[in-house]
Amino acid sequence: MPLGVAAALALTGCAAKSFDPIPPPPDRQAADAPDAVLYLIGDAGDPEWGGPILSLLHDDAAERSRTSEVAIAFMGDNIYDSGLHEPGHPEREQNILAIETQLDAVRGTGARGLFVSGNHDWGPGGERGLEQIRRQSAYIDDAAGEDLNVAFLPPEGGCPGPVAETLGKTALLVAVDTEFLLRYEKEPPAGSDCEPSTAAEAYARLRAILAEPEATARHVVVFAHHTLKTNGQHGGYFGVKNQLFPLTNIWGPLYIPIPFLYPIGRNSGVSSQDMSNPKNRRMVDSLAAAVSSAPSRPVAFASGHEHTLQVLRGDGFGADWLLVSGAGSRLTAVEKADALFAAGRGHGERGYMRVEFFRDGAVLLTVVTDGSSECRGGNGGGEACQPEPTVRYWSWLRAAGS
């Protein structure tokens, strides 16, 4: 084996990154329980790789539902790799497993589960993609029942929205289907009866929602699948493995060196899923302009898409914070750069974010992972080691009185 390839293999096989130490998160008194709690998780549609994170989320949400109104936002790519197929399709059984695993994270918790679509949920383009997303929307709506409070947003599957949902007395959640905005930038799909029906109308609707008294009186979180900013691969950052051995994305053991061609291709803007793509940039600019128009600045724009956890300042995008929470099943590389927190493949832990809205105006963000690196690191490892929810980062997004 050539020396350069051997060295690169050594790099890709190096030990997982450790998380930065943090002080203990604030312990608010039981009497001061939050009015509302929002969980953010995206890209959870691959149960083979998801590990324990959804069961940990279930228990966390059930505990907080005792004292607060709780919602869990599933921010797209709910079913890999191409959405919910029709009955009889060879992938249908795996598709159902993926969505049912997420529904189980909500079932019996007392929380509300809110699903938006991602690019993988739409699957192939054209009318068939529209069928995939309508099929998933109908499945989730049909699953709703006495012990399962779930909804697909926007309610009409395959429409851009946005739509608003109140959470408690302090929060307002605004859901947008960003894959619709990318696919149908100029014309709506054939057979669509959406209202709004075009991307331009959807941006106008977002401006109108954010200008309403309900939005100015509450803490607003806009959530969607695609990011407005990222330090991961959709933003042009690729780890050593992708830079040197891109074929491992197709099949894990395929360590054939093709140095640097993959990142060069991705950064050329060939895919609308990457921020280097002109269509993607137009969508980001339009969303940022709409969010920036709000009389009261939203607390966050939350998204998945990137298989990482990132906390970024929202300067230039209209919101106080940009929260990327796409580590529900798959993981990809990320660099910290200007992020306050970033974790991905190198850390090796799936996770979610929890946003708590207190009656005094304070808003608390907590980033929780599955704690599995403690098992791999030998600290109580072995068969007896059980991953536990572990706080990796926390921050006051807004202070009391805000």
Image (cartoon, grey):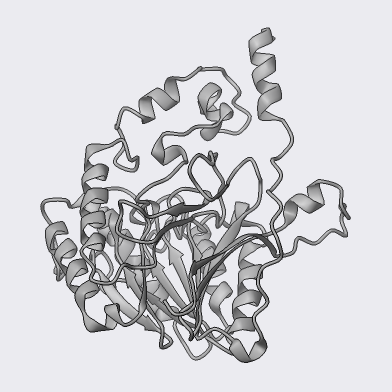
| Residue in the foreground of this view, choosing between 47 and 225 | 225
| Vertical side of 271 occupied by 183: above or below | below
| Vertical side of 130 occupied by 55: above or below | below
Q: Residue furthest top?
A: 2
Q: Going 61% across and 53% down the picture, which residue do you hit? A: 48
In which quadrant is the N terminus drawn?
top right
Q: Going 86% across and 48% down the picture, which residue do you hit? A: 378
Q: Going 27% across and 37% down the picture, which residue do you hit? A: 277
| Residue in the foreground of this view, choosing between 375 and 204 | 204
| Vertical side of 20 occupied by 385: above or below | below
| Vertical side of 240 occupied by 83: above or below | below
Location of residue 228 in the rendering, given as x and y in whole percent from the top left corner: 34, 51
373 displayed left or right of 306? right
Residue 100 seen anywhere in this rendered image of the structure = yes
130 displayed left or right of 59? left
| Residue in the foreground of this view, choosing between 111 and 252 | 111
Location of residue 190 in the rendering, given as x and y in whole percent from the top left corner: 13, 58
Q: Residue furthest front?
A: 401
Corner quadrant of residue 266: top left
Corner quadrant of residue 179: bottom left
Q: How many marks?
A: 0
Location of residue 85 in the rendering, given as x and y in whole percent from the top left corner: 39, 59
Residue 66 seen anywhere in this rendered image of the structure = no
In which quadrant is the C terminus drawn?
bottom left
104 displayed left or right of 221? right
Location of residue 76 in the rendering, given as x and y in whole percent from the top left corner: 41, 59
| Residue in the foreground of this view, choosing between 121 and 176 | 176
